[in-house]
Structure formats: C-alpha cells, structure tokens
Image: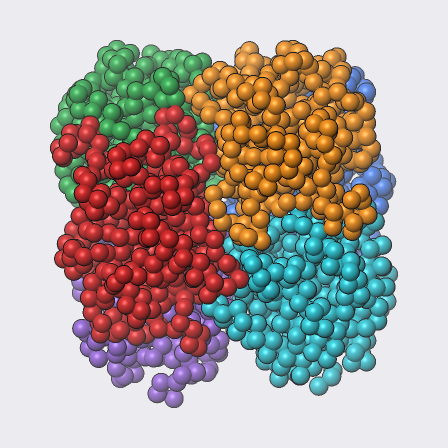
Chain colours: A orange, B red, C purple, D green, E cyan, F blue
Amino acid sequence: MDAFDPAFLPVSGFDLPRYAGIPTFMRLPHAGPADGVEVGLVGVPWDGGTTNRPGARHGPRALRDASTMVRMVNQATAAAPFHTVRCADLGDVPPNPASLDDSLERIRRFYADLVARGVTPLTAGGDHLTSLPVLRAVAAGGAVGMIHFDSHTDLYDDYFGGYKLTHGTPFRRAIEEGLLDPKRIVQIGIRGSTYDGEDREYAAEVGVRIVGIEELMDRGPEAVMAEARAIVGTGPVYVSFDIDGVDPAQAPGTGTPEIGGFSTHVAQRMVRALDGLDIVGADLVEVSPPFDVGGITAYAGASLMFELLCVVANAVARRKGRAAVVNERLARVLGGPA
Amino acid sequence: MDAFDPAFLPVSGFDLPRYAGIPTFMRLPHAGPADGVEVGLVGVPWDGGTTNRPGARHGPRALRDASTMVRMVNQATAAAPFHTVRCADLGDVPPNPASLDDSLERIRRFYADLVARGVTPLTAGGDHLTSLPVLRAVAAGGAVGMIHFDSHTDLYDDYFGGYKLTHGTPFRRAIEEGLLDPKRIVQIGIRGSTYDGEDREYAAEVGVRIVGIEELMDRGPEAVMAEARAIVGTGPVYVSFDIDGVDPAQAPGTGTPEIGGFSTHVAQRMVRALDGLDIVGADLVEVSPPFDVGGITAYAGASLMFELLCVVANAVARRKGRAAVVNERLARVLGGPA
Amino acid sequence: MDAFDPAFLPVSGFDLPRYAGIPTFMRLPHAGPADGVEVGLVGVPWDGGTTNRPGARHGPRALRDASTMVRMVNQATAAAPFHTVRCADLGDVPPNPASLDDSLERIRRFYADLVARGVTPLTAGGDHLTSLPVLRAVAAGGAVGMIHFDSHTDLYDDYFGGYKLTHGTPFRRAIEEGLLDPKRIVQIGIRGSTYDGEDREYAAEVGVRIVGIEELMDRGPEAVMAEARAIVGTGPVYVSFDIDGVDPAQAPGTGTPEIGGFSTHVAQRMVRALDGLDIVGADLVEVSPPFDVGGITAYAGASLMFELLCVVANAVARRKGRAAVVNERLARVLGGPA
Amino acid sequence: MDAFDPAFLPVSGFDLPRYAGIPTFMRLPHAGPADGVEVGLVGVPWDGGTTNRPGARHGPRALRDASTMVRMVNQATAAAPFHTVRCADLGDVPPNPASLDDSLERIRRFYADLVARGVTPLTAGGDHLTSLPVLRAVAAGGAVGMIHFDSHTDLYDDYFGGYKLTHGTPFRRAIEEGLLDPKRIVQIGIRGSTYDGEDREYAAEVGVRIVGIEELMDRGPEAVMAEARAIVGTGPVYVSFDIDGVDPAQAPGTGTPEIGGFSTHVAQRMVRALDGLDIVGADLVEVSPPFDVGGITAYAGASLMFELLCVVANAVARRKGRAAVVNERLARVLGGPA
Amino acid sequence: MDAFDPAFLPVSGFDLPRYAGIPTFMRLPHAGPADGVEVGLVGVPWDGGTTNRPGARHGPRALRDASTMVRMVNQATAAAPFHTVRCADLGDVPPNPASLDDSLERIRRFYADLVARGVTPLTAGGDHLTSLPVLRAVAAGGAVGMIHFDSHTDLYDDYFGGYKLTHGTPFRRAIEEGLLDPKRIVQIGIRGSTYDGEDREYAAEVGVRIVGIEELMDRGPEAVMAEARAIVGTGPVYVSFDIDGVDPAQAPGTGTPEIGGFSTHVAQRMVRALDGLDIVGADLVEVSPPFDVGGITAYAGASLMFELLCVVANAVARRKGRAAVVNERLARVLGGPA
Amino acid sequence: MDAFDPAFLPVSGFDLPRYAGIPTFMRLPHAGPADGVEVGLVGVPWDGGTTNRPGARHGPRALRDASTMVRMVNQATAAAPFHTVRCADLGDVPPNPASLDDSLERIRRFYADLVARGVTPLTAGGDHLTSLPVLRAVAAGGAVGMIHFDSHTDLYDDYFGGYKLTHGTPFRRAIEEGLLDPKRIVQIGIRGSTYDGEDREYAAEVGVRIVGIEELMDRGPEAVMAEARAIVGTGPVYVSFDIDGVDPAQAPGTGTPEIGGFSTHVAQRMVRALDGLDIVGADLVEVSPPFDVGGITAYAGASLMFELLCVVANAVARRKGRAAVVNERLARVLGGPA
C-alpha cells in the first residue's frame, strides 16, 4: 500500500464549492488510524491547561471549517503533499473537560496508538499543554529536538502555588521527562511583558536557544531558520506552532496575544525552511475561536497547517524512501524541479 | 432492516463533549442514501435564488455546527426520534454557484434519488428557492399540501423584468407546476411592508390560507394550528420553515428579516402541533450565517430542525406501521404515554 | 401640485435590488424643502446631549441604509403613504460636534424653515435632545401634545451639577418653554432602575401620564393606546419614539438600554393606533450604530419609521382635505376599505 | 453600625458619567468582609465545571462593567437596597484554573468566612458548579430551600464516564450532601432537548418541583411564583439564577443556550415575587462574555443582579429587625407605602 | 466646460462632519453620465460570478459609506484629483441577481454609454467577474494592457464542469476575446494554495508576467513597479485591484482571502507608481461587507480608490492636454512642484 | 518614602489569573494623588473634542480591562518599572459630557493637583483634545518639547466655522498658549488624505518637524528616533501617542483611522528609544472601544502604555537621583546591565 492512492485526495473546489460538504481537515477523507494513513490530521478539542482566556477547545472545529479553503498544491514551492503521502482526518481525541489528568492520559493513549501504527501526526489544538501528552507518545523512544514558534517560552515551572501542568509549562515538563533534548530546541518569536526572567534563565541553563522577536525582525527569517536548522540537525524533530507567535492583527483569536509579532508571510517562510528536517510530528495550537474576529485566526491557522503538512509529508516520504511529489506544471513555471 | 439500529444513534454529549468531533447534523453518522436510512438530513448550500442579502449557501455548515448542541430526546413531548427511525446525515447536494438552472436540476436529481429509495428528506437550506426542486422530486407523484412558516408568501410572479425563478417565487411556480395543492396550503406569520397586494390577491384567488402575524398573535398558536391541521387534512403534506418567520432578535442571520415576528417558543409549539400529519418532507431554509450574530440564528434553526425531525420521524414510523418511540422515564414524569 | 406625483415614489425592489443604489431614506428622491415635499424625512446626525454611551450621531446613515429594505405598502393596514403624500429625503441637518449650543440652533433653524414651507417632518435622530430644537420649530405657534415611547421619562432637571441640556432633560425644558402641554403628554414603556423619583414626581405634578412597562404588559397595547388617544385628543400632537423603549434584544444599538422592554410587534401595534391623530411631526431617536449588532436596531428603527410615516402621511392628507390612499388589492384581501 | 451609612452608596450617574471610573459592582465601594458589609457582591471568575462552551470565568468582570449602568432605586417597586443595607463589592474569589478541586475549596473557604462574619452573599459567576461550594458554606448549618431559574435541572449524576463534578451536576451533589432540601426546591424554566429522562426521574423521586417552560408560559409568572413561594415557605432559601433560563435572544452570551426561553421582563417579575422570602444567598451564573454579542447578556445579568439585590436586601433587613427602605417620592407616585 | 468647476468638489469635513449626509462616493455630487463628468465613480453591486463566499454585491454601498472619510488632497504626493478633473458619483449599475448573463450585459451597456460619452470609469465592485463586462466596453476599440493587483491570477478556464464565467476566469475570457493584450499584463501579489499549475502555465504561454508575493516582498514595490511600468509601456492600460491582494488582517472582508499578503502601505506605494501611465479605467473589487470586521476592509478599499483616483485623474488631464493640479501649500512643504 | 514599596506592585498572574479581580490599570493599587505615588496612571473618559466617530470616552475602561494582561517586566529591555518607582491607578478625571469648556477645566485642575504633588502622569484618553488641558497643567511652568506619534498633525486652526477646540487642533492651541516649544516638537507617522496643506504649512513656519509615514518606513525607527532625540534634547519633553498612528489592522478601534500605518512592533521600538529623555508626562489617546474588534486596539494601547511607563519610570527615577531597576535574571540573559 505504498503507491499513491486517489482515495486519499481532498475534494476539489472545482467539483464542489469550498463552502459545501461536511468539513473535515482540508476536505480529506475521515479515516481511522488503521486505514493505511501515513499522515494523520488530528484535533484535540481541549483547553484544560489554560490559565488565562479559554476557548482553544473550539479550535479543531474552527480549523476544520477554515481548512476547506485550502487547495491541493503549495504555489510557492510546488509541493503536492496529498500526492506525496496518504493523508486523512482522524477525528478528534475525546477529551474530558472535567479532568485535566484524565485528558492528558486520553491524549497520550490516542497518539501512542498512532505512533505504534506508523502514523505521523499533525495536530490541531487545543491549548499548548496538548503538546506534552503528544510528546509523551511521539518521543517515548527517546528525546527529540524541537522548533517552536511562539510568543512565549512555555518554560515556566508552576502557577497558582505549585501547579505544574498548565499551558505555560509544557516544555519544562517535557525536558524534565526526557522527551525533549534542550540543546536541540529553538524557540522563535518570543516577546511580551514577562513576570520575571525565571523561564529565560532556565532556558539559558539547559541550553535552549531563544530567538526573540527583535532578533527575528533584525536578522530576517532566512538567517534565523538557517541557524535553527543547524541546531536541530539531522535527528528527529518536533515542530510546535503556537498561533500567538503571529501578530494579534493577523491572529486575534487566541488566549494570550502579544503585540509586535511576526507576520503570516514570515511564518510561511519559516515553515517552508523546515523542509528537509526529519520531522516526526507537528502541532498548531492555541486558536481560540470565541476570541476570533471574522474567522481570520482560524484561517491563518489552517493555512499554516497546510504549510506544516507540506514539510511533514516530505519528511514522511523520505523516511519511507520515496521522493516528494511536486506539481509539475507549477514547478516548470517556478523553475524548480519537475 | 426495520428494527432499531444503534449504529444510527447520535454521539452522546455524555461521552464526547458537544464541541468535539467532525460536525454532522445532530452528530448522526454520515451515510449514503442506499445505507438503509429512513430520514435523511440533507444540506443544500445554495443561494442562487436570492434577490437580496446572500449567504444562505453557508447555512448547512452553520446548521451542522450548531446542531451538535442538540441532544437525543424532546423534553416537552418525550419524543425520541433517533430511536423511532433510522436517521443519518446524507451530506450536501453539490450546487453549481455559476448556474441557477444547473443547480435546480442537481437538487431535483438528488432528491429524486432519495424519493426512489424511500428516504424522507429533512433539508437544511439554502435559500427558499431550494424548496422548488425538492418539491419537484417529493411531489412528482401528485400535488401535496403544505404548512409554511414564513414572514413572506413567496408567491410573487417575477422580479427584475420577468425573471421567474427567485426565492420570492417558489410556491407560485410549485402551484403552477401542480406540485402543491393551493387549497391545502397554509402560510403562517406573514408580515412586513410589501410591494403591492399582488401575491396576496393571487393567494386569495387560488385558495391559499394566509395567517398574518397579527392574527397569529391574537388567536395564539394552538387555535391557528388546529385550523391548519384541518385544512391540510390527512393527505401528504410538506412543511417549509423559513427562519425569517421568527423575529429578527432571535433570528438575525437571514437575508430578508421582518420585525414583529413570532418567537422561537411559539415556533416550537407550532411545529409540535404538526404531529400526526402525514409529512412527506420538510425544510428549514434561509439561515444566512454571514449576517448572523453569535450564531444564534443557526442555533435556533438547528433546534427547530430537531422539532421538525420529531414529527417527521413519527410520520415515517406511522407510514411503516410502527409506533413512535418515546423516552419512557421522561414520559412517566410528563404524565404521557409510556 | 396637490395631485399624486410618481416622481416622489421610492425605487422598487422589483426593479433595482434593495442593496443597490445610493441609500436615501426608503429609497425616496433626495430633494430640498422647496421642492413641493409634503412629508420630509430628515436626519439629525448629532449626539451632543448624550450623557452616557455615544454614537447616535451615526444614526441617520444607518437608518438610511436599513430603510432600503422597506417596501411601498403597509401589509397590515394597506396604507400606501408614498401614494398618499409627496415624501422625500431632505438630507441631514448640519450639526456642529464642537458646540452643543450652536447645534441646537442649527437644528431649530432647519426645522423652522420646514415649518414655514408647510413640510411635516419625520426625523431620524440623533439623541433625544434632538427633539427639543425640533419642538422649538414645530411648536413655535403654541404648545402641542405628545405621545412618547421610551424607557425613560427624559424629564430630569439637570446633570453634572446644574447642566440643563442633555438627552435626559428635553421634555422638562419643552414643558418649561411652553412647547408641550403636559396634560396632553403620554409616556409609554417607562422602566429601569432610577436615580430617584424626582422626574416621576415632576410628571405627576404637571400632569404627564406615565404608562410603565408593567402596566403596558398587563393591559396590552390596545387599551393603553385607547387611553393615550383620549388624552391627546384632537389637537396637534407630536410623536417621539426612542428606540430604547423596545427591548434590548431587538434594539441593542442604543446608548442607554433597559431590559424588560416591549417588542417590535407591540411597537407596531401602538404606532398604528396613532392613525387619526393630528400628528404634526414625529421622530425616531437614539439608534446608536456603534453599539448595534448585525444592524438589527437600525432595521427595527427604519421599520418603525415606516409605520410612523403611514400615520403621519394620513394626518397630512387629512389636513389638506385629501383622503388617505390604500393599496386596493391588499385592502380587498384584508377586508378593509378600497 | 446598624444605621444607614452614606459611605456604602454607589457613585451616582448625575455626578460621574456611568462609563467613568474603575468598575466595581454597581459602582459600590470595594471593601473587605470585615468592613461592616451586610450584603457582599462577590465575583467567582471560574468555569472549571463547564462541559461545553467555556468563558464564564470572564463573567464577573463583564458583569461589573455592565453593572455601572444600574442606578439606585427600583422603579417598579420603589425599593432602595443601598439605603436598606450596607452593600459593597468584595472582589473576586481567587480561582485556580489548573485545578477543579482546589478551586472548589478556595470558593468554599471564601464564603465560609463571609458566613462567619454575617455577610449575605450575592454572587456573580462563574459557571453553575460555583453554586456547590457556595452552598457548602451557606448551608453548612443545615439544608436550605432553593428557587432556581434555569433551562436545565443541573441534576445529572455524572459525565464522561463517572465524573461527578461538573456544571451539570451541582444540585444532585448538594442534595446528596444535605445542603439542599429537595422538597423545598423549585426549578423554573426547564426546557431543551435532553439526553434522557434520568435527571427528571431523580427530581420526581426526591421531590423537586420542576416548572417547565411550557407550564410557565401557560400559567404566567404570578401563578408560578405563588406556588413556588408556598413550596419554599418561611425557612431559609437560596436563589440561583442561571442566565440561560432567559431566551438566547436576550442572553446569547452563555455556554449552553436553549431556544424558547422566558423574557427578561418575566424574569424581573419572578425575582420581584421573591420579596418576603428568607433569602440567605443568591447567585447569577453562566454569563459567558466571549459568546456575548454587544454586551447584552452581561447587561441583562447585571440588571437581574440588581433585582436580586432588592429582595436580598429586604431579607437581610428583616433578619436584622429593620424595615426595608423605599424611595418615598417614587413610592408616592406608584401609590405604594412611604 | 473644460475649466475647473467647484460644483464637482466633495463636501468638506470642515463644513459638514464626515459621518453626516447621504453617502455618495467621496462625498461627490450624484450626477448622470451626461452631466459633464470626466471621471465617473460607479458601483457594481453584483456577485453573480462568486464561486465561494458571497457578499461583494454589498461592496458599493460599504465603499460609499467608508469613502466619506476620504479628504481632498493626497498628502504623500500633493495630488488634488477633484481640482484636476470633474468627478462625480454616477450611481450603481442595476444588476440582475437572478441572471448572470443578463447582469453581464447590463454592466457592459452601462459602461459602453460612459465610454461613448468620454467618461473614464473608476469602478467599485462587485466580484471580479465585473471586470469582464467593463473591459468589453472600455476595450471595445482594441486590446489594452493591465496592471492587476490580486492574490489570484483569475486565469482559470472553467469551474464545476465547464462553466466559463466566474470570478476565477475573467481575464482568461478577456484575453480570448481580444480585450487584453497578454504581453502587456502584469499580475502582482499572487499567492495561496492552488488547485493545479494550469493557470500559471497558461499565463506563461501567453506571456502574462506574474509577480508572486515572495518576489514582491524580496524586491520591494519600487523595483516591481518599475518593471511593471516598462511592461505596459505608454499604451492604454486598465488597472484592476482585487482587495484580496492585501493581507487578510487589513482586508478580512473578502470572499477568498489568502494569508501572507502585502500591506496597504505597499499597496499605496504601488498605486502611486502608476502615475504617468495612460490609464483608461480602474476598478477596486471583491470587498465583501458581510465578512468584514469593523468596516476596515471597506475603509481600506475606499482609501485605495482615492489613490487610484489620483492617478486616473492625472491620466485624464493628460489626455485632455491639461496639467494635473496639486495642492500648492502641501507641495511646497513636500518640496515638490508648485 | 523613597525606597521601593511592595504595596505598589501589581497583582501577579501567577497568584491571581489575569482575568480575575477588579480591573485597575496594570493591576496596580487604586490610590489617591496624596498617597506617595510617583507615577500616576489616570483615565480621562472624555471625547468632547471629537469631530468624527466618537467613543474615546470609553477608552479608559477598556484600557484598564486589557491592561490586566500586562506583566511586571519588559522582556526586551529588562526594565522593571514597578520596582523603579511607585505607580498607582489614580482613577478617572470626572468629565462633563454636557460641557466642553467645563470638561477642559476639570481635567486641567486634576492634573494641576498632580503636578503640585510631584506626581508624573501617564494618561489613558479620551480623545486627543485631552492633551491640551493636561499640558496646561504639566507645562504651566514653561514650554516643553513633545514627541508625538500619530497619523494626523492635530495642528489645524478651526472647524465648522471658527470653532477652535477640537481633537484636530490641540497642538495649535498649545503652541499659541506657550505650552509647547514648536522647535522641540517631532510628529511621527503622519499620513492620510488631507483637507489642505494648511496645517503642514503652519508646522513648517513655526518649526515643527514632521516625519511622514513614507519617511519612517524608508529610514526605519532607529534613524528617525535618533533624530527625534536630538531635536528634543535634554529639556523636559511630553510624549503623546495617538493610537491611530498604528495601522488600522492593529488598531481598528479609533475614530479616524488612516491606512498604511506603522506596526505595533515599530511602535514599541520607537517608544523604547525614548529612554533617557526627561519625560514629564505621557498620554495614550483615541482608543475608541465601540469601533474596536475583539479588543485588539485596547490591548495594543495597554501594551504601549506599559512601554511608555518603562521610559517614564526611568525618567522619574533619574529626576529623583535614583537608578532605574532592571530584572537581574533577564538582564543577565539579554547580556545587558545587572
């Protein structure tokens, strides 16, 4: 079942208008983890780790809805992810809004099953604590690197008098649990007023590389991503994209916005620069529809999920010894490989 | 395949939170018309007949999203439609936004197939012109009666210099085409400023009974519905519910609102009063999400679709010689049959 | 120039879609006060008297926009105001947002000119202080009666340490200035928490009749309006409709909402009950578009302006010795006069 | 410290515009529980029990903001609560969004301190699970009765496989814990589709009186409240008002709306009918600002809190052997006592 | 009638506040094509070609409303278009929402009349199919060049099984019909996921120059526009500006947004760089008010229409052998010509 | 009372969630001017000078609400303003919406008291006319310099026929009154269509330096601010930040937006570049919540107030002979001073 299978192609907007049909991620078939899927798009409708404005539990549905605006091919790179690997919408992890601990375990189990079946996950959050149980599954075999787009480090130790599990602490926990190799972590876009330098001090101690928004703006996405690629190297790497890394004008629908962010254009360039890395999983988190205006955050999130999918698909193909597929007509026009 | 089948039950909010999962109508399974479905919930994402504010093409998706808030049982009547008949989401009719004529034919064909398979349709529009091709399928075998909730008669002759097919003319056409028996039509909630008395004069001539909003308010829903039931009698009847019949405070998301409408509470009572009629199809049309605020119109529409489903399911059961199913615990509390 | 003139008819929605064209009030011609107009629709884009949430200065534009949804004929009464009198949009009074006093005088002058030319004004506010300079023109020849729909009495004496001119005080001033005869004033819909009983005490002293919302709900609009008609009698009467009399669910876009209001349906019935009174002017005030949601307040306001226009037109026709015109086809259906 | 103290009066809108100033509840002084306060307005910014759409954690702030529109005196009854008892804003209970259990205990402790000091609480939620820890404090000395306005019974047993503490279960727990006497509970406004009759069956078994929306609409608020008063009798009673009891058109900003609800006008009448009961605490819960439109839900909630305050203040005065204070000028006009 | 005529000046915001008055485009007089107008601002309230989210039919009204915020003079260039040529609002083309074909012909006829009278049109759409009938009139005498700002090429061949007339195909049709010279077309800002490279391949074949967003960002607006000017040369050129070329954060109110767009600042610079070209018509299309937030898209569109007007006015003046007029005081400050 | 006092620290988000508690500016204590405060955050809820879209009267409350999202330390500079000086929320100036003149005097008096007590003010407007009475107090002892971020010069002479006091004229008046030294004024970000060059000509005559948006974009914030610092030199300087300087996508909630503005990132860099100047007061004005979407403008405004506070606090510390306090852990990470 390695060859291209048209049953895994999305519905085309030339055949059915993009606003029509039951909305799955990118109009993909709804399938189960045992159906031969190579890249599974998964929703985690949960915001139990949110210390501030809630609503990320509604993220997956809004992302599915917006994602029906996404088409087949990446016009900037000619990448054709749906022709490269078998993709499907695997539905939502069933969360338990009445229990943080039960939810963490439900998520971990769901992803452990995917990992066991060789499915590479692309997650639509949920708040950023989602990444922790996902990493508990994805990195069960050993610490991975991470490229992390965000306005916050999410490296705090605790909140509210010793509570260790919130959306401000997932990567502190993941480092402590040996899921992430701090020397192979790069955090990009960090900014905003802060409580204290404690998270930054911790990052410096364990070796996490932080690229603040000022540095990103000064050096540009190409230089920063070149360094990031060098830091994570050829080993397995997880990609975590918190939509609040993007400026609040382009992504108002999130719980903890910070002004002065990077643009979606820069975000697209940075994600495209991940191509070639050995990505073992990716997430797009913290889209909070109740705080969105005009659906633009969901649409930005869905569009960035498509960019992530392009580089994830290529990584999966490489791991399987296959070549990435590009759209030949477009590639010819762009002067790239065909 | 006549017995109750748990595979056709919606996902429960006790098991999966109501905001989670790919949104089908009322969290029903997504099925095809050949899968043994008895009542098919169908979306018609089309507003090609709209002469005024558009957006009803986005209705089915918004109605699906809102409908995941609907639970299993009607608390007022103890009706349990999902236990009474096999229901499913049959997806959307593929419209053609570039051609009014092609869209009308696509819709008719889709419903003709349902009729041929014995599936009773409950439609989520779409603008009100949708009802015409649906009737062309449902009433292909002979004129049916209609109970029609609306603020407009939709009995105009033409627009813009002789154009006969718009959302202001469907029932004039349906009467002309012999799909509706005008003497078995009741229109309820009619109001608003008007161009001219031409539609009302036509109604009087062919025998359509119009209950204006003032009469509805004065006599109350019970008396009006008793008369309506008497008018349509025991023959086959179609139910068409234009959401703009409801007051704009409760249903702002529609193309042609009219102030001074009936409330959703009255709407619920009127729909419940349809129980016992031989309903052969029903639609809920003119929800226009781009004009909605806070999703309340979609939620009202989805809730009224549930009320319609309760009476449609009972009609289907009766036609199949089965008893309607009620929730016994609730029925006991309500003092009704168990 | 007394006969019916088709040049004063609105553009029909059968000819030009209702969303098209430069928006004048009800799609009427834009004319000047000297052009033979009998009823002039005038905007007063001014909120200089507002002590609370502003924005009524944007009322006229929003009301014009919404009013293009209004058609020719009153379906409940068959009244055809545009065929009864020559109506036109006379544009906006030029306000001065930098000076309350200058604005009051600009408004008074504008209306004094209308009065001099025999034009009966139907005003779109603006905040409620607008009514004061309008009355200074309309009632320059002697005190008139008033039927006043509102949630507030607007009979306070002063604010902020002795300031006498705000939207909470216009009718106290108008009574003091001899513009209104307090014994011929009826205020309907009054409610809400209050600072103190001072305004109510004043009303009782000078003889203003106040119908609180509880009384309106208990007795119903027919009984209340019968009493109101008896109180104002056959003399000249001004009608002032503050949109905040309507419930905030139907009219959220206003500066000082009060929950528990009357519905638009009741409002329509009350305005229709004004038919036969000698109305010398009317206003619809306090629509504040920045606080509106989905434009429903503007639409309610425009629809109520149409109801006001129907009774104003009939009063003008009577004063000119002409009969009111009704739509004959509709009148026949309704069983009324033809 | 029993006499009237002007330091506990709100800031007047005649002195400072209602949009100005740091927003405390009803513009009351911010005080501590030990400052001689008799009725404490408390916020509980917490939605940890929410199984569906979140956001009630933002309720207290939105209610404070909207409550600055509230004035001194109840115009319908002449009640002057701020002159009757010493009221203050006691700030917010500090919740812990990272722990449901810790939050429940923090709330209980806060209220236990109020009870110990003789302060009667009026709570602004928060989701409906808030009522449980409040009752654990208020009813620590013995079961109380309850009048409960809502569209849901909140008497379910558990969710998501055995989880007992959610906003759908507080009163089942409170009955089990002996905090509420089920035979002295009345639930008013219940409606909506339901999972199953299990909660209604439980209610019937333990003796809770449920007034569904159909019964309320048919009998009217006066008759229903007369019965409710008879059921709870002269003993201590808690009042819990879930804003989703109100129709979604008037209260869209809530997590679990149900169409066909009662109006704010009816709500006001029902709350006023509580006067004379021995109210030992009250709450207004489930306002979810992220789902609100135009702030109308917060404004409705704040206005109903004022109605609740009027009857709570009178109960406190009675318990202290003092007479309720009314506005004399208004009382004279209304023909009531002075 | 060649000299400057003050009757064609907009109303000044120093005289009448910008929110007052019946909203014509830029507060210009409403005139007919025969009234001596040189540049006619025309609305086309039509979205019959829209394959995706509708609402552009409401564009002209929203653009008129927002355009009353525009003042007299271009502060960056000192251009004074209203003093350079006689401008007026010519009203809306009457569309037929019930017929795509009839609408196309109605638009063509309206513009053919303008062309016949020597009026240069500046159009407010409407969806992008609008440009086709406009070009059928404007380029009736021979193919023109085009500078086209957009995120899409609109060069697709057909949709939904062979339908050739949609807002995704106008320029394919215009090239086929000989209205546009493909070798004198430049498309700027193209981006977004794509169905297939078919449109790009076609563009390459016929010689259309496409500047993708990445190239625009890398080279900057000055370099790109220098090349564009060279490509179109001195012959007649049409300018088409699809608002979705602008980033969705600045222009959310459009049917088919694409993230990662250019900013309004860059848009202004690009339009100003058109000065000196022989512009024979221009349009600003795809503003869809139902999807707008806070009116910012309409305001961006109206502001860009003013920039377009500045360069169109200069082209008209040149064609008439007159000099462009600049504001002398401002020109002196800017150091430019006076 | 010169030493650091923990009583003036904000509530931490680690202790109380940021959405909880009565919202004061940045969660500071509410204090009076006599309580030892060094930097007073003051609201001016007033928009009496607004010639266009109102609502800035609601600015202070929205800014307080949004400001609870601000934390303790500036992550880009390690500045710790709350540890550097004693800050507090001094409440709102009581405006008089019924009188422009009285309001101006009330504001002046309030600030004169602050100046007399040695409190440096940081103001949250209110419209831009607010700056005039503030300067009348702050610059009572002699003309100061000003760095002014805005899209408008606010140097017009009069409006509406000679009215001199509007939000378009404050700095013309302040120069005439000797409050501002025009040769030490720099205006940054100026753009938009304009009535006439009159304000620019005046600026050139009296020596005001205007940096238009094109120059800012071309030279960058560093070069522009270096020049600005040189122009204002070491003397006392006032900082006025009109939120409409920021692009409308990031700050839609303002009365007079102009497209093509600078980003919040550039704004942050420009404000940080003010460090070292002898700032004697600062304001952030023209946030108009009724026109905001999703609260992003208020949040941008509050975030920029924090940036202003950092440089104001340092100036105050310098004037008192104390060193600025930085967060040592963060400073170490950033490589700055510790």
Left of B65 or right of it: where is A26?
right
Tell me the quarter of the picture where residue F24 sits: top right
In the image, taking residue D64 as reference, residue F70 lies left or right, namely: right
Residue D308 image position (x, y, % from top left): 29, 32
Q: Position of residue D303 (x, y in %)?
A: 34, 38
Above or below, comparing residue B76 to residue C27 in the picture: above
Q: Residue at x 50, y 42 (%)?
A: A23
What residue appears at the point 55 percent right and 46 percent down from the top-left corner? A11
Residue A218 percent across, percent down from the top left: 81, 35
Number of numbered discs on residues: 0
Q: Up-down: is C149 above or below E140?
A: above
Which residue lies at the image location 68% right of the left edge and 64% below the top edge? E172
Residue C297 seen anywhere in this rendered image of the structure = no
Q: Is residue D101 visible?
A: yes
Residue nearest the observer in this picture, C29 or D28: C29
Q: Report which quarter residue A190 is drawn in.
A: top right
Name the quadrant of the C terminus of chain E. Answer: bottom right
